[in-house]
Amino acid sequence: MARPRIDADRVKEQIIEIARELVIESGGKRLVLSDIADRMGVSQPYIYTHFKNKQALFAVLAERWFTELEEAGQAICATERAWQCKLRDLIQTFLTIKKAEYERDPALFVACLELASPHRDIIERHVAHLHSLVRQILTEIVPPSQLNTMAHMVLDATSAFRVPYEIARAPERATPERAEEVIAALIHYLESCFAENLTTSDILSDPSNADAHPASNQASRTQKTVILPV
């Protein structure tokens, strides 16, 4: 009689979920394949048929974390809002997601950073993807010859609000209010440098441009006091 066919994808998902549970339960201090095997009621070699080692398993966990962020960023870039609004939303959304993870369990947050540190390739791919999102937003105002430079400038200036190590090192500085101050300064700089590329609709649609849009001043001030987890 033939053995029942094993759903390899389902088993792999089960391993990933148990690994995530164990990382949380141990505060990020322990991720051992034998523990996963014990919880599943299988042998340790069976786990190796799906993941060659612990590092490969944790790499998948890290990839999924970055995928959530990247999908949120892509959704923001896909909107038809002005580039100023999209830039604000992108940085504030990354801050909201990462700061929430830190505040949920600071020790686990730091421990997971240590577990992720060997996977530089995954981190670098994520940074490259974020750079491409910023480039996409800035295309509306920055000429192609300067896109890379301006995108790097934005990422460098906002590192305190999006880099996990920076958030863990100085969480008191990683606030929406401070992020808004930096974002507003970046927008002002970009507008002053590339004003010839702005259209009237760009100026009017930016709620921070009080002189250009006086009728919405009061509404703009009200909006800035509300932190939206977009």
Image (cartoon, rainbow, N blue to C red):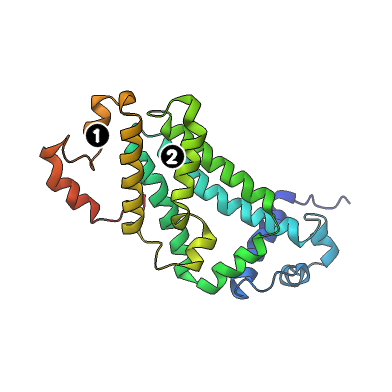
The disc at residue 78 is none
Q: Quadrant of residue 171?
A: bottom left
In front of the other: 71 or 157 = 157
In front of the other: 107 or 38 = 107
Residue at (65, 49) in percent of width and height: 122
In front of the other: 13 or 197 = 197
Q: Give the residue number, with chain letter if any, for mark 2.
A: 75
| Label located before the other in sequence (2 or 1) | 2
Q: Is residue 132 above or below residue 96?
A: above
Q: Position of residue 13 (x, y in %)?
A: 66, 55
Comparing labels 2 and 1, the label whose residue is closer to the camera: 1
Q: Quadrant of residue 28?
A: bottom right
Q: Amino acid at mark 1?
A: Ser
Q: CA distance from mark 2 to mark 1?
A: 19 Å
Left or right side of 182 for 110: right
Q: Position of residue 64 (x, y in %)?
A: 59, 52
Q: Amino acid at mark 2?
A: Ala
Left or right side of 225 for 50: right
Q: Is residue 37 above or below residue 129?
A: below
The disc at residue 205 is 1
Q: Position of residue 142 (x, y in %)?
A: 41, 29
The answer to whether residue 82 of the structure is visible from this angle is no
Specify few, some or many for label 1: CA neighbours under 10 Å numbering under 14, 14-19, or 20 or more: some
Residue at (61, 70) in percent of width and height: 111
In front of the other: 196 or 81 = 196
Residue at (89, 51) in percent of width and height: 1
